Image (tube, grey):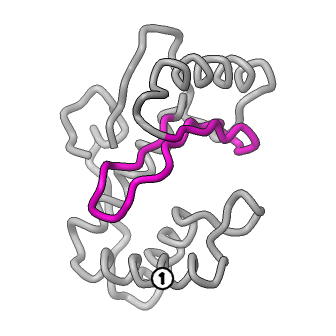
Amino acid sequence: DVVCDAMGPPIQYSHAINYKEKKAQQAFLRTAQDTLHSHGPLAIIDQARVPILKKFGAPIGGKLNWDLSCQLIGLVNSRVVRQYVDTYPIVRPLCMLIKDWGQATQVINAPERYLSSYAMVIMVIHYLQTVGVVDILHLDPHFFDLDSPWPV
């Protein structure tokens, strides 16, 4: 994950945003879309709980696909998953397998109110914890300090 932190009011680590915040985020993403249009096909996904600007169309082996969000909770979530992937070698290939299956069967399809790929990854980690393959990790105290040099 890459974080671009603009000067502004502090962002709360919450999944819930109010109507006014969502409209402000959508306006920011429209400006970003206008600015970044030369990087390929872009779309604002504003029906999502947290609006994002998504870049589409990268062929396999081509340029990178990415998305831009106005909230940092995704970064915190990525750090948790990253710690499991780095600590337990079984996590990455199993998650990739389950994600491929979920996308092929359309079980992973968040825009249609099915599961997100992140939800599937968390369920895989939970299952591995339940059967005793991975531990519940005790996170570093600086883990949630986004200003710390913790690698993502």
- In the picture as drawn, the residue positioned furthest to the right comes out as 19
In the image, residue 41 sits, relative to residue 35, either above or below, namely below
* Mark 1 residue crowding within 10 angstroms, few (<14) / some (14–19) / many (20+): some
Give coordinates of residue 145: x percent, y percent: 33, 32
Report the label total.
1
Residue denoted by label 1: 98
In the displayed structure, 52 sits above or below 70; it is below
Q: Main secondary structure of the magenta part?
A: loop
Kind of residue at badge 1: Ile
Q: Quadrant of residue 14?
A: top right
Q: Is residue 86 left or right of residue 106?
A: left
Asked if the magenta segment contains residue 135, the reply would be no
- Which residue is found at the position 38% from the left and 60% from the top? 59
Q: Which residues make up the magenta segment?
A: 41-68
Does the segment drawn in magenta span residue 60?
A: yes
Looking at the image, residue 20 sits to the left or right of residue 13; the answer is right
Locate residue 49, reporting x and y percent. 71, 43
- Nearest to the observer: residue 65 or residue 130: 65
What's the residue at 33%, 31% (across, down)? 146
Query: Residue 119 vs residue 22: left or right?
Result: left
Give the residue at the far bottom of this rendering: 131
Residue at 34% x, 65% y is 60
Image-quadrant location for residue 94: bottom left
* Towards the viewer: 29 or 71: 29
Residue 3, percent from left and from top: 35, 31
- The location of residue 64, given as percent across then percent down, is 33, 49
Q: Residue at x 71, y 57 (%)?
A: 111
